[in-house]
Amino acid sequence: MNKNKFTISWGDFSRYRSSMFGLSIIGIMVFHYFEHIRSAHLLLKSEQFWDYYIGSTGVDFLLFLSGMGLFYPLTKNDDICQFYKKRLVRILPAYLLVSMPFFAWRDFIHLHTGILTFIRDLLFLNFIDHADTTY
């Protein structure tokens, strides 16, 4: 039996997660570079491999790593409400700090649509109903 057999465990994802996040972000940046090159009709034959075959796999890998990062804390605690509460407390203040001034300017000053549209924008309801992807 060969003792030097190459194996990967789930712990390796945790140990090398920062490096894998970095590689996936670099992949996303390269994808967007080639996307802009393609839109300018300057894509060379040597660059088509990345554009056609590798594409946006960086996004897929980033989402996989993020899901794995959420899976472990979720399995450590049976209280799913506490799990979501902890994440909302961390994410919601930053979201509101950025989104409230933007939507206030857009809905009250620029478009004059009013308070109902402002609330719907904050809750992503306009995104769901009208595919409003401005933010």
Image: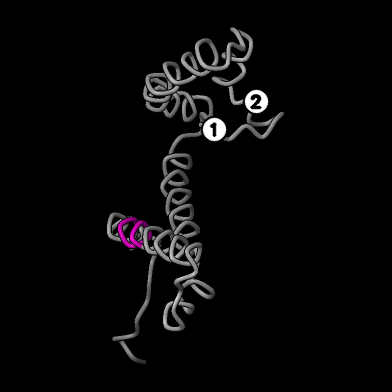
Q: Residue at x 46, y 23 (%)?
A: 85
* Image coords of residue 69 (percent x, y): 41, 47
Q: Residue at x 48, y 79 (%)?
A: 49
Mark closer to the observer (1, 2): 1
Secondary structure, mark 2, is: helix
Q: Which residue is nearer to you in this view: 88 or 122?
A: 122
Circle nearer the N terminus (1, 2): 2
- 55 vs 96: above or below: below
Q: Is residue 22 magenta?
A: yes
Amino acid type indicated by mark 1: Thr
- 49 vs 109: above or below: below
* Image coords of residue 92 (percent x, y): 43, 23
* Count of residue discs: 2
* The magenta segment: 21-26
Q: Is residue 43 magenta?
A: no
Q: Which residue is nearer to you in this view: 102 or 128?
A: 102
Q: Which residue is nearer to you in this view: 40 or 95?
A: 40
* Image coords of residue 26 (percent x, y): 33, 61
The residue beneath circle 1 is 134
- 128 vs 112: above or below: below
The residue beneath circle 2 is 126
- 59 vs 55: above or below: above
* Image coords of residue 9 (percent x, y): 38, 66
Neighbour class for label 2 at 10 Å: few (<14), some, many (≥20)? Answer: some
Residues under labels 1 and 2: Cα distance?
10 Å
Q: Point out which mark residue 112 bears.
A: none
